[in-house]
Image: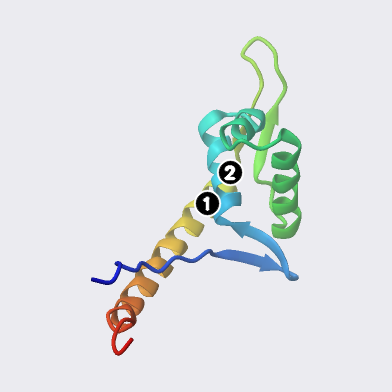
Amino acid sequence: MPPELKPRFNVWLEVDEKVALSRWRVQLLEAVARTGSISAAAESMDIQYRLAWKRIREMEERLGLNLVTSTVGGKGGGGTTLTPAAEKLVARFNRMVAAIERCVGAEADSYIKHIWDDL
């Protein structure tokens, strides 16, 4: 019996042939939203703070949007939150990826059924 095959793919959006948004970058923004900190988000994704900050700045530059708002520490402590635009962008990107997955999955199923034919 042949193994069950599942299609997999990656999605990213480019500006001037440079990555502006990707699943990984959106996961980084989601981690910032969840943890309230770029540092904690980086730690949760097992990457260096410097890389996380660099990728956020790249996204902001390429998209022409502010994606995070940071406050300095103090009595209530500092932190970083997503801007309303970033929250919408993350939600829309995730909906787009889900729609692509549905389309690819539905289309690929008919092909996958016949991959093993005549082999």
- Is residue 73 depicted above or below 12 in this figure? above
Residue extending farthest to the left is 1
What mark, if any, has residue 90 been given in the picture?
Answer: 1
Determine the secondary structure under disc 2.
helix
- Is residue 105 depicted above or below 61 in this figure? below
Residue sitting at x 58%, y 29%: 36
Quadrant for the C terminus, please. bottom left
Q: Are marks 1 and 2 in contact (CB under 8 Å)?
A: yes
Residue sitting at x 55%, y 37%: 31
* Quadrant of residue 110 within the rendered picture: bottom left
Residue sitting at x 46%, y 56%: 94
Residue sitting at x 66%, y 21%: 78
Q: Amino acid at mark 1?
A: Val
- Looking at marks 1 and 2 on the same chain, the residue that comes earlier in the sequence is marked by 2
Neighbours of disc 1 within 10 Å: few (<14), some (14-19), many (20+) = many
- Point out residue 118 in the picture as x, y percentages from the top left corner: 30, 90
- Point out residue 30 in the picture as x, y percentages from the top left corner: 53, 42
The answer for how far apart the CA atoms under marks 1 and 2 are is 8 Å
- Point out residue 1 in the picture as x, y percentages from the top left corner: 23, 71
What mark, if any, has residue 29 been given in the picture?
Answer: 2
